[in-house]
Amino acid sequence: MHAVKLFGPGDLRLALCDAPKPQAADIVIRVESAGICGTDRHLFKGEFPCAPPVTLGHEFSGIIIARGEGVDLPLGARVACDPNCPCGRCALCRKGKVNLCANNRAIGIHEDGGFAPYAKLPAHRAHVLPPDLNPLFGAFCEPLACTLHGVDLGAPKPGERVIVLGGGVIGQMAVQLAKLAGAEVLLVTRQAAKRRLGEDLGASLTAATLPGALALWPQGADLVLECAGVPETVTGAPALCTPGGRVVVLGVLPKGTTVPIDPFDLLFREISLLYSFLNPFTQGRAAHLIASGMIQVAPLISRQIPLDDAVQAISQPPHPDDVKVLIVP
């Protein structure tokens, strides 16, 4: 089979490789859809640690076609992959902080992932989806699980005001989760199409810039969710908070990037600045929210592309209006 394999920074190819075979406790799935994530572009540029050569793709789902010894998941079941495989033995794992496990082996980053017709994963990292679910939707479970963790940390309450920075897939999901929590939501993104999408998904207000957001809410928000992953929004997020407010950064900046922060402002206004990493124990909730239709993912699909077009799509900057591009092998 052919797979989108990263051999090193800047060296991404559609390479011929053997189809995976399940070992004990593994399953092999026929990949139905796999999402291109901003992290994939960071991996391509050498801005995020990984273990090349490796098949990329950590947001994917499909149909079980083979299983190893000891697996009781049925053949033919539709499943979404939770790509993170913590060791379960280290001090952080024993504390329940599995997302911080230094021994984590992530599928699509350290182990071969889902940008291929077939993919292997440990059976315990599979989350069963309804058989009648749209086959494109399972690829959203992983990004929604990561968004859930960030929103959990921010803990929006009914009646609070929440500003979401960034109109990509994480931002659009954060809008929906904050709305479900009973908060009033303001989405900030430069792209007009993404502002319109945010309004359709539950944002009460939208703005193109950070000053524009403050013009609408001069007192600021109780919670700011930074989902853009750019220095401007990470630096500017605290200024959008009301005194006593919270900032949660979900966006990923390249390794080594630094941004200016005003510690006195954080102190004097008692602003909490938190960071959110991965998806600890949230993948099952994400699968339920998508399967139940409580979180809409169909409007987030910008394009579907074949595997042959994946290298170009990952190696080039995303289209400004893209929210989620799906690879359909």
Image (spheres, rainbow, N blue to C red):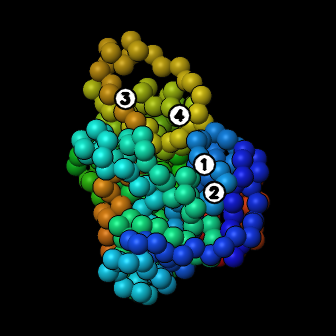
Q: Nearer the viewer, mark 4 or mark 1?
A: 1
Does the rendering let one see residue 240? yes
Q: Residues within 10 Å of mark 4 (few under 14, many from 20)?
A: many
| Residue picked out by circle 3 | 273
Q: Residues within 10 Å of mark 2 (few under 14, many from 20)?
A: many
Gap in angstroms between the C-alphas marked 4 and 1: 30 Å
Residue 284 is tagged as: none
Looking at marks 4 and 3 on the same chain, the residue that comes earlier in the sequence is marked by 4
Task: Identify which residue, 315 or 213, lies in the foreground.
Answer: 315
Looking at marks 1 and 3 on the same chain, the residue that comes earlier in the sequence is marked by 1
Residue 51 is tagged as: 1
Residue 233 is tagged as: 4
Task: Identify which residue, 105 or 165, lies in the foreground.
Answer: 105
Look at 49% across and 75% down and name the residue there: 22
Indicate the amino acid at tag 4: Thr
Indicate the amino acid at tag 1: Ala
Mark 4 secondary-structure assignment = helix
Q: Residues within 10 Å of mark 1 (few under 14, many from 20)?
A: some
Instruction: Give left or right: position of 157 versus 115.
Output: left
Quadrant in the picture for the N terminus? bottom right
Looking at marks 4 and 1 on the same chain, the residue that comes earlier in the sequence is marked by 1
Query: In the rendered image, which quarter is residue 266 located in?
Result: top left
Mark 1 secondary-structure assignment = loop
Q: Nearer the viewer, mark 2 or mark 3?
A: 2
